[in-house]
Amino acid sequence: MKIPEHWTFKSEGVAENFDEHVRESLPWYDLATKTLAHVVRHYITEGGIVYDIGCSTGNVGNAIKETIDERKVDFMPIDNSKEMAELYNGPGMPPFICDAVSFQYRPFDVAVCFLSLMFIPPGEREELLKTLRKKCKKGGAIIVFDRCLPLSGYPSLILSRLTLVNKLIAGVDPKEILSKELSLIGIQRPIDVETLEPCVEIFRMGDFAGWILEQ
């Protein structure tokens, strides 16, 4: 896939190649998805409501489709990219094409932010998290998987290199790795874990991690 100089999901080329590209860039993508699906099933109630914020082509929904069907869940995918939404191939209604921050959420059991918060500006991101906490039902959860700010000291360098090593092992061209990192400048802003607290970490691979925010 040709990497845009300035990364965007509002591109037909990116959307059409997204599923393959994300698995090359993040070799642990499917493992993280399985982890997410296992966790989400613990919070979905019969006839409940689940939001997939930044649904892309339907990865999260497809991972929990069996539970969605069995428990008659109202599954609501959201994405701000028309190009991505047009290629959505997951359960539930067609994606809401909108800004996740200003969206009018109904009280829900689960909200999933899978590799999406890092593409929302920090100030708006905190506003979104406040809204989600208010709308999450008692006993429900917000599940976040994202890139986070580096740790301090030598461990930070170790984890950063681990991310690069995984990409190289997966066979990604080093030039593409560099081009992608440079294209993300100012667009992808890793999250500060403190803004998620209280939370419980459930996954980590290099600079990326996953958390449960219970209500």
Image: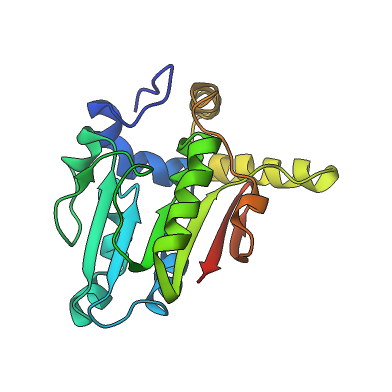
Q: Residue at x 61, y 65 (%)?
A: 199
Give the vertical position of 87 relative to 214 (above or below). above
Q: Compare residues 177 and 144 and report the one nearer the observer.
A: 144
Give the vertical position of 69 relative to 77 (above or below). below
Kindly indicate the quadrant of the structure image that contains residue 68.
bottom left
Q: Compare residues 166 and 199 and report the one nearer the observer.
A: 199
Q: Is residue 37 found left or right of 185 in the rendered image?
A: left
Kindly indicate the quadrant of the structure image that contains residue 200.
bottom right
Numbered label tally = 0
User: Colour scheme in the image?
Assistant: rainbow
Q: Residue at x 43, y 45 (%)?
A: 116
Q: Is residue 76 found left or right of 209 in the rendered image?
A: left
Place of residue 163 in the rendered image (x, y in percent of width and height, measured from the top left):
61, 44
Q: Residue at x 62, y 46 (%)?
A: 148
Is residue 170 visible in the rendered structure shown here? Answer: no
Is residue 173 visible in the rendered structure shown here? Answer: yes
Q: Compare residues 51 and 107 and report the one nearer the observer.
A: 107
The N terminus - image quarter: top left
Q: Compare residues 142 and 164 and report the one nearer the observer.
A: 142
Give the vertical position of 65 relative to 2 (above or below). below
Place of residue 171 in the rendered image (x, y in percent of width and height, measured from the top left):
49, 39
Place of residue 28 in the rendered image (x, y in percent of width and height, measured from the top left):
50, 54
Place of residue 190 in the rendered image (x, y in percent of width and height, measured from the top left):
58, 40
